[in-house]
Image (tube, rainbow, N blue to C red):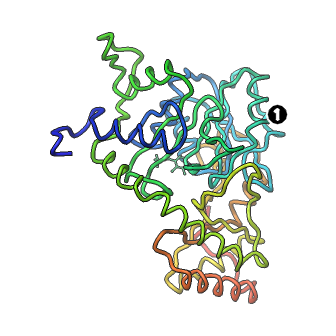
Amino acid sequence: MYDNKWLTNNGPLLQEFSARLAGYLGVPFLVPTSNGTAALQLAYRLFNLKGNIITTPYSFVATCNSADWVGLDVKFSDIDATSLNISPMLIEGEIDNNTSALVPVHAYGNPCNVDAIGKIARENKLKVIYDAAHAFGVTYKNRSVLLQGDASAISMHATKLFHCVEGGALILKNAKHYERAMNIINFGIDVRKQNISPPGFNGKLSEINAAMGLAMLDDVDKIISRRLSHYHLYKALLSDHVAYPKWNEDANQCAAYFPILLTNEAQRIAVHDELAKHGIQSRAYFSPSLNKIDYFSKRQTAACPVSESAASRVLCLPLFYALEQKEIRKICRIIIKTLNRYPIRKACSYLSH
Ligand SMILES: *Cc1c(COP(=O)(O)O)cnc(C)c1O
């Protein structure tokens, strides 16, 4: 970065990173952004969304906060109990005259029912912006799942499968949208026309993040393959004891997360706490169901019982490159032992939402 004497503003490292990343993902138009939240907000402004959007309550809070923050009303539509993705059967009940887009999430990288969602969007003239924050490297019917809908936002935050410390990208389908989006993340400055339009914001990714991304791209295949072997070992050891979200049969597994579903919240808490006693972190992810967040629950009445149930029972187990097989075996032994003794005590306060 210092050799180039260029620290940010679409520098040479960013251009190299964007091109390599687009090639790796198999997508034609990729707009790098400062984070995944900015990529979502860029999409909402690029497509000039108004009124309300319909999204899933089973996600990280950035999905709905990003829309709220640009003045869109958020409507939640409950999820399918097997995939834990937004249920196409329920979406139509939420659409009204002010709905401008659907914002589904590929939860844990598991592709939504994209065909049914696409059909609903066409019939109701809605945009589809996928929150694909977890779907790095995921294919659906042998093409990148990021090519579904009108746009897909990925996150390259440090907690994600692939990262550049902080970063994101919006995947688009044509050059016109791409150029407009590149202006929007640069304050709206149209360099070629010497003009400022549309009103933009600062959503740029810096050279230091691009350098990190380039370094990570060198290793990402190795990282994914090791994570996949962790994933399969967990599955082999736990499948007789816990349930999983059902993975889309037309998609590959990306091993971004290892979520397990327990029978109820007390059991989840027991497993979480027993792991914690051994110094092992696990996460109730996604919890709470987003429709239960104070500022959203006050505005909308529709309950999302399926999402609320999943949010109370889910636990994501440790999954990272440096994890070792013997550690996975130990984690699974602790879980199985805890489940055998269950119920050991009542729900405690750390999940007091
Ligand atoms: C991480 C995440 C985001 C936000 O990405 P940032 O890069 O952290 O802004 C959005 N949606 C989901 C589902 C996420 O997991």
- What is the quadrant of the N terminus in the image? top left
194 in relation to 246, above or below: above
Q: Nearer the viewer, residue 152 or 345?
A: 152
Q: Position of residue 275 (x, y in %)?
A: 57, 81
**Residue 111 relative to residue 192: left or right:** right
Q: Position of residue 120 (x, y in %)?
A: 78, 29
Disc 1 residue lies near ligand 1 with CB under 8 A: no
Label 1: how many residues lie within 10 Å, few (<14), some (14-19) or many (20+)? few
Q: Nearer the viewer, residue 79 or 248?
A: 248
**Residue 218 relative to residue 339: left or right:** left
**Residue 13 relative to residue 349: left or right:** left
User: Residue shown at 76%/54% (left/top)?
Assistant: 83
Q: Nearer the viewer, residue 337 or 237?
A: 237
Amino acid type at image mark 1? Gly
Q: In terms of secondary structure, where does tag 1 sit?
A: helix
210 in relation to 183, above or below: below
User: Residue shown at 72%/20% (left/top)?
Assistant: 125
Q: Which residue is mark 1?
A: 93
Number of labels in the image equals 1
User: Residue shown at 66%/80% (left/top)?
Assistant: 270
Q: Nearer the viewer, residue 91 or 156?
A: 156
- What is the quadrant of the C terminus in the image? bottom right
Q: Position of residue 291 (x, y in %)?
A: 67, 47
Q: Quadrant of residue 317?
A: bottom right
Q: Position of residue 23 (x, y in %)?
A: 48, 40
